[in-house]
Amino acid sequence: MNLLLGRTYTDKKNYSKAIPYLEYTIKNEPNNSWRKVWASAYLGTCYFMQQDYENSSKATKECIDLNVTKNATNYAYSRLLLFGFDDFYKNWKIVDSENFRFHFQNMSDSEIKNYISIREKAFQDINKFFNSRLPKKIDFFVWDSRDDAKEILKANLGFAKPEFCVVHSYSRQTVGHEMTHVISNYTAEISNKTRFINEGTSVYFDQSNQDRLKQVKDWKAKNNTQIGIKDCWLNGEKYSEEILYPLACVFTKELIDNFGKDKFLEFFKNQTYENAKIVFGDKLDRLIEKTDNEINN
Ligand SMILES: [Zn+2]
């Protein structure tokens, strides 16, 4: 019962309420109990979200060390890597700023200073739009080697895990993309994300000032094909980053320019085409048609 409550509160992101139930389970269960290891694993997440990194690391490692069930051990091990507690990170430089806790694999102190001030400014600029209150600082990992990241995290850089306010990025990535995934996640309760809108938004706010319309047109010319916004929206997973990102950005910009920030944010909570029809009305299809024409001409 205590584990169930602890788990339920963790899933509901009510971490301070979850902790006593999880601690109770850990204290009262024997070392070979599956309940105990799962409680430790969840406790690691709760403490992480409270920025109590020491206890988060301790609980996560305890779950792994007890090694009772494979699922719990794997769960805790993936957190150990994601949260930066693995021994691989032991020589990384950790630097706190107002909105971030940076982790640098390999960067000089003068570069770090500059890197941080650029990202703090970007955070402020992006959050002027979203007005989000994040539950914690963003743990922002700056990898110097994509190969290391691939080996350790089994994933390609960069990516964000908004639910934990974690970003793993490559040192030469755009300033705003990954942080926008985190910031935008807390603008409201988001019930439904789509790849098209979610990525389009992060590309739009990536602060890189690239000509995305030109990228779409170049891609079209190279691949000798037509492309449609609606299909890309409905079937986002089918499309490569190379075309989906710039196309989605072009359309996200149209949504914001035509309907304004408040309407866009209202829609952003449920990013489906169906919900867009409800929020934006008949003008939506006209805007899709207009943008499709612009792209395909
Ligand atoms: Zn992205």
Image: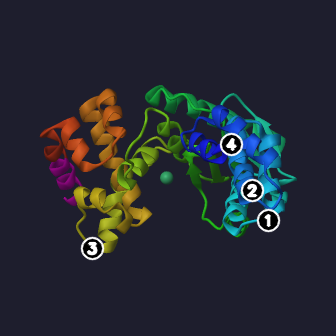
Q: Quick check: 86 left or right of 137?
A: right
Give how far apart the Cα atoms at labels 1 and 4 are. 27 Å
Query: Which residue is under mark 4?
Result: 139
Describe the element under mark 3 as helix, strand or loop.
loop
Indicate the quadrant containing the C terminus: top left, top right, bottom left or bottom right. bottom left
**Number of the front mark, 1 or 4:** 1
Residue 172's place in the image compared with 256, above or below, is below
**Disc 2 target residue:** 37
Mark 4 residue type: Asp
Q: Main secondary structure of the magenta part?
A: helix
**Residue 64 horizontal/vertical position (percent):** 79, 60
Q: Amino acid under label 2?
A: Val
The amino acid type, in three-letter code, at marker 3 is Asn
Q: Magenta residues, as a range? A: 288-297
Mark 2 or mark 1, earlier in chain: 2
Position of residue 136 measured from the top left corner of the image (x, y, whole percent): 64, 33
Q: Position of residue 244 (x, y in %)?
A: 37, 59
| Circles 2 and 1: CB atoms closer than 8 Å | yes
User: Residue at left 41%, top 56%?
Assistant: 245
Q: Which residue is mark 3?
A: 224
